[in-house]
Amino acid sequence: MVVAEIKPFTEISNMLKPYKRILVLGCGTCMAVCLSGGKRQVELLASAIRMAKKINENSDDILIGERTIGRQCEPKFVDQIKDESSQYEVILSMGCGAGVQELTERLNSIVVLPAMNTKFIGVADSEGNFFEMCAACGDCILSLTGGICPVTRCPKGLLNGPCGGTKNGKCEVSSDIPCAWVLIYERMKQLGKLDEIKKTIGPKDWGKDQKPDKYILKEKSETVTVK
Ligand code: SF4
Ligand code: SF4
């Protein structure tokens, strides 16, 4: 999932200063799962904005709406709020950066502002902590590294490791981080594939990570339909 965290409230408040009619818009997929921009967080942020506006602006014509759509990054969900959004001056998006941009493009007569800082593609542990796992490099080498990504999980992104700094299984950059290459070694050992770790992984084709990237379906029948 895409993982994001809410911006500091002061930053959000400053962005919203010129506006009185604000729609706080959540995203029911990644942002809901990482507990940062789903329905509950929309309620909390909207009521905090309402309170701050009341105290600071003492105005009666303030309208703070709340809504959460399935995904802000998909046109059919964005279209659900086309009519409703026309009564607001601004949408405060609690989606990731892709969501903010999709809203901007499809609802182009309205200002869209980001409430979130988008951080990474990651996973959650059982305690609800989130960890980066994939940098979307466009040329996946997990088949060569026991399913552990050195591009993302080694701070140096070493394709052949470890470097000389690994100590007691930890990374030299921070003792909080397990050395990705020790993890890869242990995993390859468990799989009985230690011989493979001796092979040098060649340079990655970073051309596949060109920005802005795109993915065009060759056959429309390949389209995944989500109901
Ligand atoms: S090798 Fe690239 S695509 Fe594969 S997990 Fe790592 S960053 Fe993601
Ligand atoms: S200690 Fe391991 S994870 Fe850290 S930079 Fe070196 S190889 Fe990468």
Image: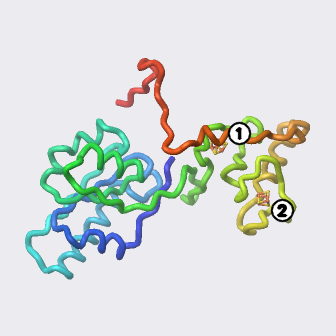
Q: Say what amino acid the circle numbered 2 marks.
A: Thr
Q: How many marks?
A: 2
Q: Secondary structure at mark 2?
A: loop
- Of residues 26 and 197, the one nearer the viewer is 197
**Mark 2 Cβ inside 8 Å of ligand 2:** yes
Number of other residues with Cα within 10 Å of mark 1, as a class: few under 14, some 14 to 19, many 20 or more? few
Q: CA distance from mark 2 to mark 1?
A: 21 Å
User: Residue 159: x, y in percent?
Assistant: 77, 47
User: Residue 6: x, y in percent?
Assistant: 41, 64
User: Residue 134: x, y in percent?
Assistant: 61, 47
Q: Say what amino acid the circle numbered 1 marks.
A: Leu
Q: Residue at x 73, y 35 (%)?
A: 143
Number of other residues with Cα within 10 Å of mark 2, as a class: few under 14, some 14 to 19, many 20 or more? some
Q: Residue at x 72, y 45 (%)?
A: 148
Measured along the vertical axis of the image, is residue 136 above or below residue 154? above
Q: Is residue 219 left or right of residue 75?
A: right
Measured along the vertical axis of the image, is residue 208 above or below residue 21? above
Q: Secondary structure at mark 1?
A: helix
Measured along the vertical axis of the image, is residue 190 above or below residue 34? above
Q: Which mark is residue 142?
A: 1
**Mark 1 Cβ inside 8 Å of ligand 1:** yes
Q: Earlier in the sequence, mark 2 or mark 1?
A: 1
Residue tagged by mark 2? 166
